[in-house]
């Protein structure tokens, strides 16, 4: 606890020191951390436009949903509001690190392997949470007021509630993440899987507890049951009764399995319904705020022409064009760490929509094989899907990289047979170090061209894909080994008698 507390203090002091020396003006123009979607300056401009009565979506700068305008309408140039913002973003990073600590600790407690528990129970949660909290990329994202920190917080909260088998809160927080960005909606499948698995484990634990309390009553009746079984075996007439009982037991077991399947289907239906219900409520609230110009929603609801204003043609969910359509269609092609800006500038206009559709559809197609293979490991499946989403994101940042690392390391037993660890670490160091110099050579100095930045961003995304492939390979090896061990335990021993007889005959001779 002392080590964890000291690391938390160190992370807070580092963030306060960066704010004190006012390094936001240096890093606020860095393309590695600021994108058209995560920029806080664009949000301040939209709040300023809203205060003067003009639409915040009039230009092409602001692309967040309307609730964030209502949350940050108090932001001014005063020192109090600045320190309030800084405290909010420091708290977001702190909560994220604590959630990572709690999730990893819970996964280690659920593991049956004692060797892994003894190794990683004390070291791993503190190490990974400190890697996230003390990482320079997360510190710079906190310094720049990156709006992507909110989506990371929502994803981690949904995982934590899913690990505690709370389906309502996990779907609500995931709906908040899907409200800010569309792509986290794909995480609903692993979240529901995690909730179902945790509930089944809790049910098994309750059954085990009830059986353990009823042990002494069973011990008394053991001798009587043995005597009855002996009598039944001797008498041929009672064998028929046994067969009938066995048939009844099989029928009862089949009914129980059907009931379990029906309960699982109900949980799936209920989880999907809750997710889309929360998402719809958030969209309706944002529509109300957009119609009322973010002032008073109560006065708007008391108006007798409320439904006419809500479903008017002029203001019928027009913010969706500037938020979700902007993310999916990738209209802004400013240079960033991703690959879409270069590919879409080089392609012909005729093939642009086809390329955008294929690039966005890759994540949806990848859900099917991943869920079929890793459905018994929902937390690992969630890490794979989030990593594929971030790699193929239209506007990625460097702050997504430590978040992905923490998600992939949450289950250490699936990472026992990973290779080339030092190679990947050195490769990422070189690639990240060359991002800003190549951008400066092209944009500021004018001595290079776009291929410099595209080449280094391509190598960065290629390194991320290699890491993901290596992690999946090691997980598949570990899972197949576990299945083979289970088969060996369940299989009966097979003895061969003839070779032993031959050996004995030779010895006798």
Image (tube, grey):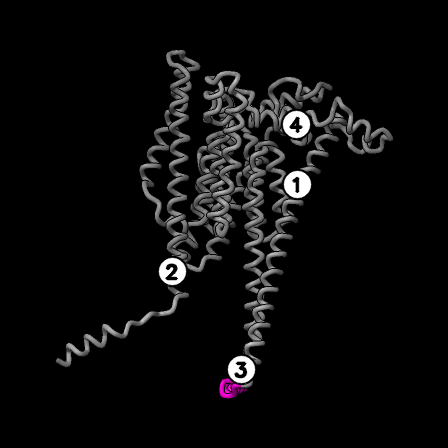
Q: Main secondary structure of the magenta part?
A: helix
**Judging from the image, what secondary structure is the residue with disc 3 in?**
helix
Give residue 128's quadrant in the image.
top left
Residue 320's disc is 4
Q: Residues within 10 Å of mark 4 (few under 14, many from 20)?
A: some
- Which element is circle 4 on? helix
Magenta highlight on residue 221: yes
Magenta stretch, residue numbers = 218-236
- Kindly identify which numbered label has been placed on residue 276: 1
Does 500 sit left or right of 379 as displayed? Answer: left
Q: Dot 1: few (<14), some (14–19), or many (≥20) neighbours within 10 Å?
A: some
Q: Which residue is mark 2?
A: 485
Q: Residue at x 49, y 25 (%)?
A: 23
Q: Is residue 438 above or below residue 192?
A: above
Task: Give the x, y percent position of residue 359.
Answer: 50, 29
Whichever of callouts 3 and 4 sits on the residue coming sooner in the sequence is: 3
Question: In terms of secondary structure, where does tag 1 sit?
Answer: helix
The answer to which of marks 3 and 1 sits earlier in the sequence is 3
Helix, strand or loop status at disc 2: helix
Residue 31 visible in image: no
Tell me the CA gap for discs 2 and 4.
Answer: 52 Å
2 or 4: tag closer to the N-terminus? 4
Residues marked 4 and 1 touching at CB (< 8 Å) = no
Label 4 and label 1: CA atoms lie apart by 16 Å
- Is 29 rendered above or below residue 5? above
Residue positioned 57% across, 60% down in the render: 202
- The CA span between labels 3 and 1 is 56 Å
Q: Which mark is residue 239?
A: 3
Can you tell which quarter of the image residue 319 is in?
top right
* Coordinates of residue 259 in the picture (x, y in percent): 62, 60
Q: Position of residue 153 (x, y in %)?
A: 56, 40
Marks 3, 1: nearer the viewer: 3
């Amino acid at each position: 606890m002392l080590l964890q507390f000291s690391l938390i203090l160190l992370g807070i002091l580092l963030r306060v020191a960066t704010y004190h020396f006012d390094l936001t003006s240096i890093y606020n123009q860095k393309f590695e951390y600021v994108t058209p979607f995560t920029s806080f300056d664009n949000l301040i401009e939209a709040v300023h436009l809203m205060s003067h009565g003009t639409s915040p979506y009039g230009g092409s700068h602001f692309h967040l949903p309307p609730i964030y305008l209502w949350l940050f309408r108090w932001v001014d140039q005063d020192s109090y509001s600045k320190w309030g913002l800084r405290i909010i973003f420091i708290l977001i990073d702190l909560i994220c690190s604590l959630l990572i600590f709690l999730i990893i600790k819970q996964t280690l407690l659920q593991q049956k392997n004692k060797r892994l528990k003894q190794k990683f129970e004390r070291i791993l949660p503190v190490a990974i949470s400190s890697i996230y909290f003390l990482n320079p990329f997360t510190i710079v994202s906190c310094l720049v007021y990156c709006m992507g920190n909110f989506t990371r917080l929502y994803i981690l909260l949904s995982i934590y509630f899913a690990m505690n088998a709370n389906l309502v809160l996990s779907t609500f927080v995931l709906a908040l993440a899907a409200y800010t960005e569309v792509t986290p909606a794909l995480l609903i499948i692993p979240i529901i899987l995690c909730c179902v698995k945790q509930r089944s484990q809790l049910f098994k634990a309750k059954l085990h507890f009830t059986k353990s309390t009823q042990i002494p009553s069973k011990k008394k009746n053991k001798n009587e049951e043995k005597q009855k079984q002996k009598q039944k075996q001797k008498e041929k007439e009672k064998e028929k009764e046994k067969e009938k009982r066995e048939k009844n037991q099989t029928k009862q077991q089949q009914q129980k399995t059907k009931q379990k399947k029906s309960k699982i289907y109900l949980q799936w239906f209920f989880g999907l319904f809750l997710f889309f219900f929360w998402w719809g409520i958030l969209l309706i609230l944002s529509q109300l705020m957009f119609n009322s110009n973010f002032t008073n929603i109560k006065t708007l609801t008391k108006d007798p022409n409320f439904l006419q204003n809500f479903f008017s043609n002029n203001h019928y969910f027009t913010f969706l064009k500037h938020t979700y359509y902007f993310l999916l269609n990738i209209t802004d092609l400013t240079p960033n760490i991703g690959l879409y800006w270069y590919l879409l500038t080089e392609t012909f206009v005729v093939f642009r929509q086809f390329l955008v559709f294929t690039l966005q559809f890759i994540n949806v197609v990848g859900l099917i094989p991943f869920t079929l293979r890793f459905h018994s490991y929902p937390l690992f499946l969630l890490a794979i899907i989030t990593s594929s989403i971030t790699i193929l994101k239209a506007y990625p940042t460097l702050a997504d990289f430590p978040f992905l690392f923490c998600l992939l390391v949450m289950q250490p037993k699936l990472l026992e047979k990973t290779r080339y660890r030092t190679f990947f670490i050195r490769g990422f160091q070189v690639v990240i170090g060359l991002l800003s110099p190549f951008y400066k050579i092209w944009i500021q100095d004018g001595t290079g061209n776009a291929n410099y930045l595209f080449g280094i961003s391509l190598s960065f995304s290629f390194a991320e894909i290699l890491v993901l492939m290596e992690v999946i390979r090691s997980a598949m090896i570990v899972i197949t080994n576990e299945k083979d061990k289970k088969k060996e335990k369940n299989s009966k021993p097979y003895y061969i008698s003839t070779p032993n007889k031959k050996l004995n005959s030779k010895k006798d001779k």
